[in-house]
Image (spheres, helix red, strand yellow):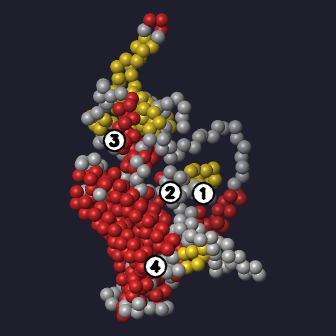
Amino acid sequence: AVMQEATELGFLNHNREAMLHLRLVAIHVVKRKLLASVSLGTTSSANGPGKDYDQCEEMGLLSVPTKKKSTQGMITYQSLNPAAVEEAQDLIEDIRDMYDEADNFLFKSHSAWSEGKVSFWKHRALTEAYALCPIGQALKKSLCNGDVMDDEIESEVDKEAIRCFEKLVKAQKPSHPDSWREYIRYVSASHLYGGIGGNSAQSQPDGVAVVASTLRRTRGLYQKAMSSVKKAGQATNNISHNMHSWLGKGIDSTMFHRDYDTALSDLSREYLEFERIAGSEESLSHAITLVRSKLANWNPSLVPAVAITNEVDPNGKRKLDTSNDVSMPDHGSSMLTDDHEQQDEEEVGNQSKSKRAKVKTDLKQPKKTDGVHKVRIGKMEYPAHPYTIHVSKLSKDTEDMDLVDAFRSEFGAVVHAKIMREKITGNRGHHYHGESKCSGLVQFEERMSAEGALQKDGEFEVGGKVIKIQRSHLPAVGIVP
């Protein structure tokens, strides 16, 4: 009711992010109520009240038996009473109605907002997969009393979750790798009982057949994912400029998307690990071929977390330090090589290093500035400040706070911004600030904010004027963060 009233009064009509965020937060509150009701209603302990859903619980299977049995902390499970069952069913229906309302309202008026659709369907798919579908199945089983076969219930349990995951991977074209990773993680989980196959219970795998069926379905999803994502190096990070502005407003974490190539490398690594564990030589070879075609142009040095070290490889080139690389683990560079190829490379490297002699020299070694952006001033080049941008073609009336307000709302937190002005020398050598040079500096808290702003060169407006955005070799403040 509050959301509808705020929307009808016009408070949210021009802010689609706020409209989606408000609805997701409301759904999250109701979902917490559902989980708390189920958890407390199905458990009791020696101390009295049951366990809430956000508390820890021991596995119990690996506990060491003792002569003296302690009842402290022991949990007793029980069935939900009829009133709690009815309340849980009502809450599940309420959550699904809230999702339907958000879908109908938002995406009829913002049909082209693909990032919002991805965020919405990811939120809904995860809620259905790990809360609504499992709880709904358990409630149906408790109420069937033998009138409905368990196989028929299980054949229906995952259909809504699978429908939402299908919507998720189709919400954006080409799909984001992380959307497929969430889908595959759910399908490959041990709780899936083959309820997404045919339309009748007879066409569903049963018993031991579920194991092989789950492996085949997981492999099929990996292959669909690899065929529907972009190749590395082709993706443009067109949503990074919105990420930090959403962070400042507390937008739900499902709205954030990682770097495309980083997510693609993770998807590729997980696909190969799956085939190494649960595949044959033929399926692994096919997976390697698919991954090679997608990662042929992948450049790990473009990932911000990668750093260049002094380590030298056999060809005399500097190696990339991937110890802090979020995109690939240490064994990621060997994803596409066989064990024999790795051994051959190690032997060649050891022989090359042994032949090299360390020669002392008094010559100054050049600074290693590979991968650092440069700013050309006249005939000189200077390293660009990673957090600061230079803006020009501003209006004469633009002030410092105008820059702060414009860039903070769009790209993220701003440390400082200042307009460049003419210096006027008065009596006794005193300097005064004169007219604006129609240019200035903006320094952000995060590197990604500066990168997002640079992508909007020639498009972003301040004070009604389209401005030019470039890298700066100077910070906006004297103390560099």
Quarter holding residue 400: top left
Q: Which mark is residue 323?
A: 1
Q: Is residue 232 visible?
A: no
Distance from disc 4 to disc 1, alpha carbons, whole Å, reads 53 Å
Mark-to-mark CA distance, 3 and 2 = 25 Å
Give me the residue at 50% from left, 57% from top: 300
Residue assigned mark 4: 81
Residue at numbered disc 2: 300
Q: Residue furthest right?
A: 67
Mark 1 element type: loop
Q: Which residue is mark 3?
A: 457
Type of amino acid under label 2: Pro
- Are the residues flagged by discs 1 and 3 in contact, CB closer than 8 Å? no
Q: Residue at x 49, y 37 (%)?
A: 385
How crowded pointer 2 is (Cα within 10 Å; few <14, some 14-19, many 20+) is rated as many
Q: Amino acid at mark 1?
A: Ser
Percent from the top left, x then y, of residue 481? 54, 37
Amino acid type for the residue under numbered disc 4: Asn
User: Tag 3, which secondary structure?
Assistant: loop
Say if mark 3 contacts mark 2, CB within 8 Å: no
Left or right for 221, reference 383: left
